[in-house]
Amino acid sequence: MNGRGASVARASRGRARRPRFERQLPQQRRQALIDATIESLKRYGHAGLSIRTISAQAGVSVGLINHHFPNKNQLIAAAYRHFNSELVGGLQAAVARAADSPRARMRAFLEASFCPPNLDQDALAVWVVFWGLYRHSRLIQRVQRDTYRGYVRLLRGMLAELLAQARAPHSRRPRGAARAARGAARPDLRLAAIGLTALLDGLWLEWCLEPGAFRPAEAVALCEAWVEDLCRRASGS
Amino acid sequence: MNGRGASVARASRGRARRPRFERQLPQQRRQALIDATIESLKRYGHAGLSIRTISAQAGVSVGLINHHFPNKNQLIAAAYRHFNSELVGGLQAAVARAADSPRARMRAFLEASFCPPNLDQDALAVWVVFWGLYRHSRLIQRVQRDTYRGYVRLLRGMLAELLAQARAPHSRRPRGAARAARGAARPDLRLAAIGLTALLDGLWLEWCLEPGAFRPAEAVALCEAWVEDLCRRASGS
DNA sequence: CGTGCTGTTGTACGATCGTTCAACAACGCA
DNA sequence: TGCGTTGTTGAACGATCGTACAACAGCACG
């Protein structure tokens, strides 16, 4: 009763009073809610999709989410978009940081794939929840379509460079190699990208399900052996 | 009001009266509920885990499930066990049906893996739901541990045969080959099984996510090429 | 035909879900 | 210092969740 008047009186009396909450800019709060969503999914799996669980994780009240997002699905889709772009961005950065040789770039890509934060049991839990939403949520489908493109382009580009170099190992044209190889190599490149993606994703999945089964370095080695066989077959034909 | 007396009167008047439900043996009803659970998961994803959705799918009332299963989790675990054993049993049967040569057996295994009912978008939806439960349900973990053993044994056995034949291609001992190769080949066999499983699962996953990306026969070819490279490397060293 | 067993039904209950909304309060600004 | 904007709170709503349980009814049997 009379809560407001009492608090105003306390404040005007000069007593130090901690604010009950902190106002933030919409942009910052939105990002905090997105982070809390992902953290909540890591901790509680599908149960972490609850508005109350997410708001508790973010340290805010239940009503705040609908002030920054029109509904729950939009928040989840935003979290999925952020999760995807973190992955793709991290891989792209690792490749860009590597030496300017197709092999070194591929190695950097593989090592980044089999390192934290990508290689993480909690991350798998998050992916699984999103995958489960895929078929019944147009929002999730749209995010998937938007972000997957960058991943495929990155991986295909590296494979094209490697295959071009394997076919013409003595000509020094690392820059134009991908473009030059595009004609005749396209059917092989398509299957090669499919196979490498499958091997990569499968190893990643296996490790997350049972981290003791093999070491990350062994996964990188398996992928590199596969790429090596691919190049050998390409140069042999 | 007085529903019972009225219906008895109708019945004794000789009017034909359809039974409102059919009693079934517990074993049959349990299986029907398990089938309904899987079908419900295929149709509605994670939302299909609801007691009311499953009972509607099975054409029974909500209360019946708790008469045949102590709670929802036990039903789900039973469904997961059935789903797993259907997969492993189908693969084992396909291998047993194949010709008695390591290559033929491996081919049969791969073709069965990339065929309905295993290669099915709906099936992926079911797997994803179960995977999402894995971390937080001891029942699911137990089922996984029980059933995965058979799958690994099957795949490792075929790989061992193939590697043994590759190492000694001229000695005719297809029966004892696996046993003979067990000593020196074990480290390679371990990584080989990991790699093939990853490639297989990854291709399966990719196809289910985007069935138009490649044909099942191409997936089989990719796996066989991988096995071929493995054997070549084993015989070369 | 009547009786007993038990498979089956459907309501009821408390908990939790996503969402709404009126009231509160933090903080920039005059 | 007081005011206005608006980020934030938390109670309340109806829907739906898993489970319990008393009543019903199919069907085998005497």
Image: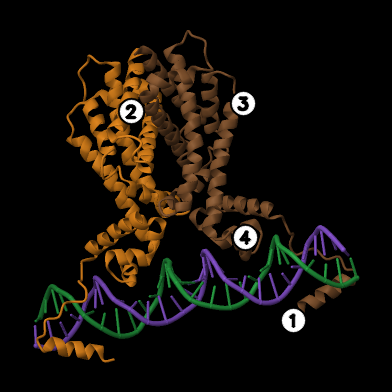
Chain colours: A orange, B brown, C green, D purple
For disc 4, the marked residue is B56
Name the image quarter holding residue A197: top left
For disc 1, the marked residue is B1
Report the side of A85 relative to B162 (left or right): left
As drawn, the label of residue A112 is none
Disc 4, SS: helix
Image height check: is C2 above or below B89? below
Residue flagged by tag 2: what amino acid is it? Answer: Leu
Q: Choose mark 4 or mark 3, whichever is in front.
A: 3
Chain letter for mark 1? B
Residue flagged by tag 3: what amino acid is it? Answer: Arg
- A141 or A98: which is nearer to us? A98
Give the x, y percent position of residue B36: 61, 53
Question: Does residue A135 appear in the picture of this structure?
Answer: no
For disc 2, the marked residue is A222
Chain letter for mark 3? B
Q: Residues within 10 Å of mark 1 (few under 14, many from 20)?
A: few
